[in-house]
Image (cartoon, helix red, strand yellow):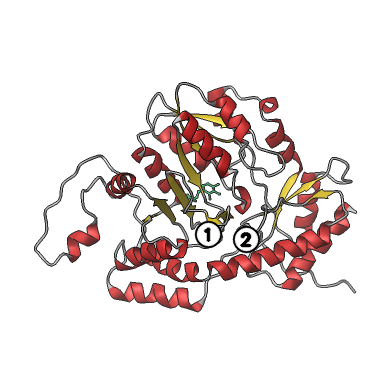
Amino acid sequence: MTEPKPPFLPFALPDIGDEEIAEVVDTLRSGWVTTGPKAKRFEADFAAFLGDPSLHCIAVNSATAGLHLALEALGIGPGDEVITTTHTFTATAEVVRYLGADVKLVDIDPATMNIDPAAVEAAIGPRTKAIVPVHYAGLAADMGALEALAGEYNLKLVEDAAHALPTTYANRLVGTLHSDATVFSFYANKTITTGEGGMLVTRSDALAARAKVMRLHGISRDAFDRFSATVPSWYYEIVAPGYKYNLTDIAAALGLHQLKKAHAFRTRRAEIAAAYDRAFAGLPLITPPHPQGADQHAWHLYVLRLADHAPIGRDALIEALFAQGIGCSVHYIPLHLQPYWRDRYGLQAHDFPHSQHAYGQMLSLPLYTRMTDADVQRVADAVVRLVS
Ligand SMILES: *Cc1c(COP(=O)(O)O)cnc(C)c1O
């Protein structure tokens, strides 16, 4: 008799509870479904979560939108160059092109998989205006070195924190560091989700003011202020050709409750990562780097790398896991291999040896709060069997 096939274990699943569902229903019944009181509350709660009510938190409909708004507000435009990591999702870099500026991709530090500050420094030229690090997988980039470079060369610093809620660096939450802006993502597979959504965080009054105007059509006041004012207030002014990047209250309703669970979610993700680490010790595998000291990894991703002498290749491993009903992914196909970026800048794989090598050996295992201990064990056992 054959065993029944176990159900498919997807690579990622959101963890949405009854509180989120009730809050969305409440929003639907309230009559205010676009940006309104719940988006405002989500922004205030986010500042409180980061522990600094003086931070500006600007809710947007994606992290991509938030990155675009941040760079626009910093004045990035044609003729400028922005340095970022090749080992990221295209959103990090594409926003630079929206603004007509150019992207300078650099390699990673193979130990951390984060942007290599030495490669950043080597790439700085007369047109360089900003650096955009990514806190890859939820491990903070070397912000001390990047802040020093930004200071020395008078560059802007915008953190792509799509993986980094909650991550700490030098015992401070990402979002409260010394960059010009930090952008979080609430896409479906991120550590907290609003379906689609993001948050732009900044200490700069000027950046916040510009981003708020550009978030909604270049209108000098937002729609909620207009419609909820106690004085008759139909008048508004368009001061720029803005975008449509506001977060709806339906999405913010999810975010209000997801944010309350963010620390508990992280604790569970860290438990799963630790279980994987234990299972893979002593095998021809490179387990993910951990933060230094007492710092926190958000564990958005568990990126496993095969050692050079592993008995199976990455593609075969992913196929074998899939055949056993386990979904995996790869983060990322480096940008220097993607036709648009490769062709536009004439990029070659040997210019990015660490990202290129890591790409060939890496896979991301399922890691999410709805996994049971048995699910985690099932994935770990399958990997162990295949690489032993
Ligand atoms: C998910 C992601 C983004 C884009 O986030 P959206 O909210 O989907 O726009 C940007 N950068 C990185 C590194 C990401 O993983």
Q: Earlier in the sequence, mark 2 or mark 1?
A: 2
Instruction: Give me the C-alpha separation between circle 2 and circle 1.
Output: 9 Å
Q: Which mark is residue 25?
A: none
Left or right of 218, for residue 372 = right
Percent coordinates x, y for residue 236 in the rendering? 15, 51
Residue located at (82% from left, 57% from top): 280
User: In the figure, 110 relative to 120: above or below?
Assistant: below
- Tell me if residue 13 can be seen: yes
Callout 2 secondary element: loop
Q: Amino acid at mark 2?
A: Ala
Residue located at (54% from left, 38% from top): 146
Q: Residues within 10 Å of mark 2 (few under 14, many from 20)?
A: many
Q: Nearer the viewer, residue 239 or 203?
A: 203
- Tell me if residue 324 can be seen: no
Q: Which mark is residue 188?
A: 1
Count of marks placed on residues: 2
Callout 1 secondary element: loop
In this figure, which residue is indicated by the disc labeled 2? 12
Q: Amino acid at mark 1?
A: Ala
Residue located at (56% from left, 65% from top): 14
Q: Hey, which residue is sitting farthest left in the picture? A: 232
User: In the figure, 161 relative to 271: above or below?
Assistant: above
Cβ–Cβ below 8 Å for labels 2 and 1? yes
Image-quadrant location for residue 40: bottom left
